[in-house]
Image: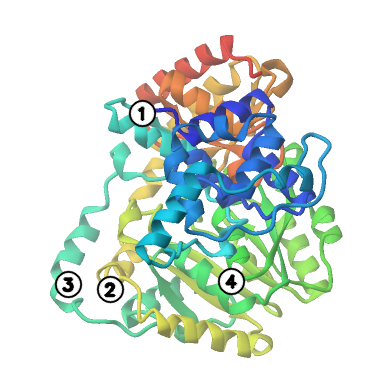
Amino acid sequence: MTTFSDRLKEAMYAQNLKQIDLVHIAAENNVKLGKSHVSQYVSGKTVPRNDILHFLADTLHVDADWLLGDSQENFTARENNSVAPKAPSTTKTSGSVGTSNSSKRGTTPMKKAITDKNDNAGSSAMHIFKKSSKLDNVLYDVRGPVVEEAARMEERGTHVLKLNIGNPAPFGFRTPDEVIYDMSQQLSDCEGYSPSQGLFSARKAIMQYSQIKKLPNVTINDIYTGNGVSELINLCMSALLDNGDEILIPSPDYPLWTACATLAGGKAVHYICDEQSDWYPDIEDMRRKITDRTKALVIINPNNPTGALYPKEVLQKIVDLAREHHLIIFSDEIYDRLVMDGKEHISIASLAPDLFCVTFSGLSKSHMIAGFRIGWMVLSGNKAIAKDYIEGIKMLSNMRLCSNVPAQSVVQTALWGNQSVNDYLVPGGRIYEQREYIYKALTDIPGITAIKPQAAFYMFPKIDVKKFNIINDEKFALDLLQDKKILIVQGSGFNWKQPDHFRVVYLPRIEVLKEAVGKISDFLSYYRQG
């Protein structure tokens, strides 16, 4: 069966357009079409309304009935049971989206027959439930359309090598034995809710860890545990942002930050991290993008997806900028214990006692327990200026009752027990040696360059787009997946605007990475897009 999704991808490829291009063209023509809409169409999860169908057909220079493919019957039934918005009235140079086309789009014979049948039965039209428009501009391609295609391939029995997500467990990284043992001994005490901010023992350990990191003015009441840092990011954005408020977020970013800011009604304004400066934030770009609507800035240090570690002098410049413009600093430091080459991680909050800072960390990566879902945030510095905001944080924290209690029970053991991850980060250790291999192996491929990561377990290589004629990085990732059964995440999945980067996770053992790099090298020896 040829579906709408199949035809849409074929037409997009023929026109050298990617998903974000359709979103931009729609905006130019006053057509409401968000990233999540297009993602749903491409993945085959849904088909568009009649007006959107014709907009896509006009933009892609194809016939609407052809584009619909064998999805016609479901589409017609759906159209019958929903009220389509008014078709766009503007005209686009690349297509004929306008009133002259919309006047021809009356009820099709098939649609009319179904309507008559419903009328004769005396039944009312079925209401179609759609997702919230808040999701229109939300992107999370770390688990997006390319990943969905990988899942379909696996369902057909194809083995896919996943270099797309930082999940240590599938690659043989084990949770420290003492963490598992301590949890098992405490399970019977973890059957009920904890206080909403977390167990006393967990928060006390986090507070002491914060003191070692030199975070200023932190008490046990400034600690909040969460179901991973992800939940706490969402909570903080929801408590802070009103519609139209702006927040500076790095590009490339971990896309959850942008997604949560957008869902909260805010506007994510992306500042550039400069590849020519070891992926450090471009301070002047940050400065240019601050407006009277800017409430806060976000840093991710150590960085995902680049693996960069920010030195004190860069952090100090960010603090100075935040001080000048009275901004909150949110610092995502989930990888703060995965640092290599003798470097030291510095918490930015330690440099800003007069500012209000929120610092995020957790055990998912440092203790290889991503599935346990245990993270935390620490409020520090000048809390007096954020008193009302903190009340909002408390309110939302209370509403979710508490985070995972069994996972909270091992925070003390994990933070103050044997730090087994340290052995992975020195010469001879798995993460160190895998980084050394992947950096050299990938940069030995003609057309690939990279900045060597100093922390975490990600690298963000650059592709010579002219050499490979790449104009759509999602298609590059999809073609690599289908040709070589290797799953990566394209740079645009991290809100990077150019189609010239991708992220690889170097958690697999070296023998697996060798196989992967060999396949990538072979793929690039013949790959040309378009």
Q: Is residue 393 left or right of 45 when viewed as pictured?
A: right
- Residue to which mark 3 is pinned: 186
Q: Residue at x 65, y 75 (%)?
A: 241
Q: Position of residue 296 (x, y in %)?
A: 70, 70
Q: Quadrant of the C terminus?
A: top right
- Residue to which mark 4 is pinned: 237
Distance in Å between CA atoms under marks 4 and 2? 24 Å
Q: Are marks 2 and 3 in contact (CB under 8 Å)?
A: no
Query: Given this view, does label 2 or label 3 mark the residue nearer the observer?
Result: 2
- Residue to which mark 1 is pinned: 160
At label 2, the amino acid type is Val
- Could you tell me which secondary element the residue under label 1 belongs to? loop
- Could you tell me which secondary element the residue under label 3 belongs to? helix
- Asked if residue 204 is positioned above or below residue 155 in the image, the reply reads below
Q: Position of residue 103 (x, y in %)?
A: 72, 47
Q: Residue at x 36, y 36 (%)?
A: 151
Going from the N terminus, do you reach mark 2 or mark 3 first?
3
Q: Residue at x 29, y 28 (%)?
A: 156
